[in-house]
Image: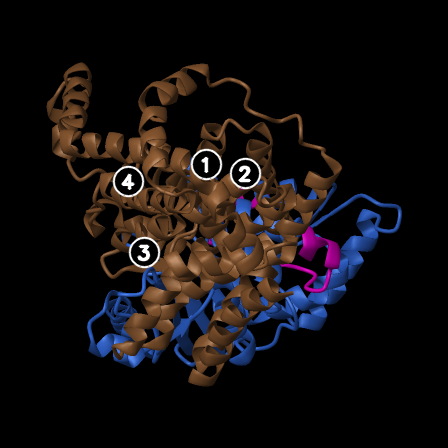
Amino acid sequence: MRESPDSNLAVPTTPKGQPPTNTPELAGAISPQFGAETIKLAWWARIRIGKLALFIVSLFLFVLAIALMKEGAHGVAPLVQKTFSVTNTANSLGFGWLFSYLIMSGSPVAAASLTFFDAGIINKLGAFAMINGSRLGASFIVLFIGLIYVLRGRDRSTSLSMGLLSLAVTATTYIPGFFLGATILQTGWLDKIQLQSGAFLYSVIDLAIDPLTALVASILPDWLVFCAGLGIIWLSFSLFDKCLPQMSIKESRVGWMSRLVYRPVIMFVLGALITMISMSVSLSLSILVPLSARGFVRRENIVPYIMGANITTFIDTLFAAVLLRNPPAFTIIFVEMFSITMISISILAIMYQKYRKVMLVFVTWVTASNRNLVLFMVSIFALPLILLLI
Amino acid sequence: MRVLVAIHDLSIIENVLQFAAQIALKVDEPLAILAAIESTADHPPDRVDAILTEACQRAAIPAAQTQIQMGEPIKNILDEARRGNYDLVIVGDLTNHRPARLFGVSHAIRIAERATCPVIVVKGKAGPTQRILLCDSGSEGSPLLRRFTAQLADLLPGEEQVTVLHVMSQISAGPGVRGKQLRVSADELIEEHTPEGELLKQDIRSLEQSRLHPIPKVRHGLVVDEILDEARSGDYDLVVIGAYIGEGWGRFLLEDLAHKILVQIDRPVLLVR
């Protein structure tokens, strides 16, 4: 056990410096070889066939959805270009932002932006802006759930802090990231980074997906094919969420994790890794809740965690770019991830302490009064609307 | 109780000895004063000796064993602290030394972090120690307070005002979490028997046994910021914190908050081990 001015610095350890286990007696009772085999068997035993099947289904639906959206994208061109007047970069940003609010998810919107780009409805910069907008809109989800709790009479600060922090960190990294990424895209610095391989994946798609897509396209009009794709991708993400193991970590197991203050870089990597698996920032944030019996998390830990999560949340969009067989689409997502990583690392290296303080002060200000909250809510709806109407 | 007063910079000798003088009155053994100075043409050993003698007289330190070692101050002070088996080391630091504050490489902080015994880093203006801020982490196993009272009980005659501070830096991890405990005061936490409340209750009981009358306090916010703010706003004369003793993976994973406090604080700090 180690201690310092706060419990954060206290790490309960065994005499050998290892984190505590909840079954020390077992470790001493069995031989290392036997023990390792037992753990391996237990691990295999824990894999549920149902969840595995659900994962395969969700993956199939994702691939099918991308194919349908690609096929039907031309059908929504008039809607995007004429009805919503998405004709410039600012429009694309606002459109992606509001679209995410509407469907309460960012990933389907990001995938849709790539299909729009593939169909020539928006240009490279427009797709990049729409993807940025989709992330800004997606970070509203946690806040929205918090608002429901506030309306039910729960405390404003407790219910909204995490959502506000997530939104604030996303906005302050994605907005500078947008300008950096736009510069990179316009200068073509990273244009050579494109995924060339994937022959096996494409042959599988040709065999299993294309006939189905062709059938749907022959029955439905293009715009409805796109909408069907959008619905299916939304469904695939919902199913994928159900594939993830239920978090039942108790305080007695790794509860001490929530009491410590980790180095920002550790939390940054952790956020990135967890989101790489869960593919959703809001889901990886919800994983934090059962880590502590009381559902608390250290202020010090959460900001870099969100930063890391905001980068790897693009993994599914990267996969969507591969499925589209459009190399420049892959470059767009790569530039997005690269620019957000650069901005996040710069903040962590140069001004992290001040940045974290500003984020927390902002959250405190918004939750301080109903007036501030209303002002904030109005601004996050007005801003994308203004961008769309420019 | 064996106390080593370490001087590594002659510009702060007065401040360190002034602080050490009040410690000298509370301990039975005479202070050991070591001037470990970098060898420079401006400070030949005889000049250092003269400055040290004069400063001791001005600070009215009753009886002290003095010695001078030239070159490698950090190494010499740490070697002496180890060799002499001291219970406490007192070392001065230049509070407003900007390069040291920016990079955290001041000699005093290095000594405090590497020493094996408790260290008082004298920063800012050292006056009489009347108000003490004790920052308790609440970690299990080796509570700061138990070590503090066990190792340094001689320094507490009972006249000081001691505030026991626990900083809750938690926020709710999700919208559905009930977070009343994230806003309440120390007294409410004690009444509700929360983990933090139980910790404070235990601390108060322990200090009362040492004939002290502590005040429990809880602050909500970032740990380092809240400790620094409380130290300043409460105008404490001494801040007591636990040392970071990261081992193995812990050193790689965990933030060294003690270091941040040592670098940023503007008043004397006692680093307990």
Q: Residues within 10 Å of mark 4 (few under 14, many from 20)?
A: many
Can you identify the residue that label 2 sits on? A119
Label 2 to label 3: alpha-carbon separation = 59 Å
Can you identify the residue that label 4 sits on? A240
The chain drawn in brown is A
Circles 2 and 3 on the same subunit: no
Circles 4 and 1 on the same subunit: yes
Can you identify the residue that label 1 sits on? A70
* Vertical arrangement, residue B253 with respect to residue A29, above or below: below
**Is A14 or A374 nearer to us in this picture?**
A374
Whether the residues at callouts 1 and 2 have beta carbons within 8 Å, the answer is yes
Residue A263 on image: x %, y % = 48, 47
The image shows a total of numbered marks equal to: 4
Label 3 to label 1: alpha-carbon separation = 56 Å
Whether the residues at callouts 4 and 1 have beta carbons within 8 Å, the answer is no
**Label 4: which secondary element:** helix
Point 39% across, 54% down: residue: A8
Magenta segment boundaries in residue numbering: B80-103
Q: Residues within 10 Å of mark 1 (few under 14, many from 20)?
A: many
Who comes first in sequence, dot 4 or dot 1? 1
Whether the residues at callouts 2 and 4 have beta carbons within 8 Å, the answer is no
* Vertical arrangement, residue A9 with respect to residue A156, above or below: above
Label 4 to label 1: alpha-carbon separation = 21 Å
**Label 2: which secondary element:** loop
- Asked whether residue A189 is drawn in magenta, I would say no
Q: Amino acid at mark 3?
A: Ser
**Quarter occupied by residue B63:** bottom right
Chain B takes which shade in the image? blue
Q: Amino acid at mark 2?
A: Ala
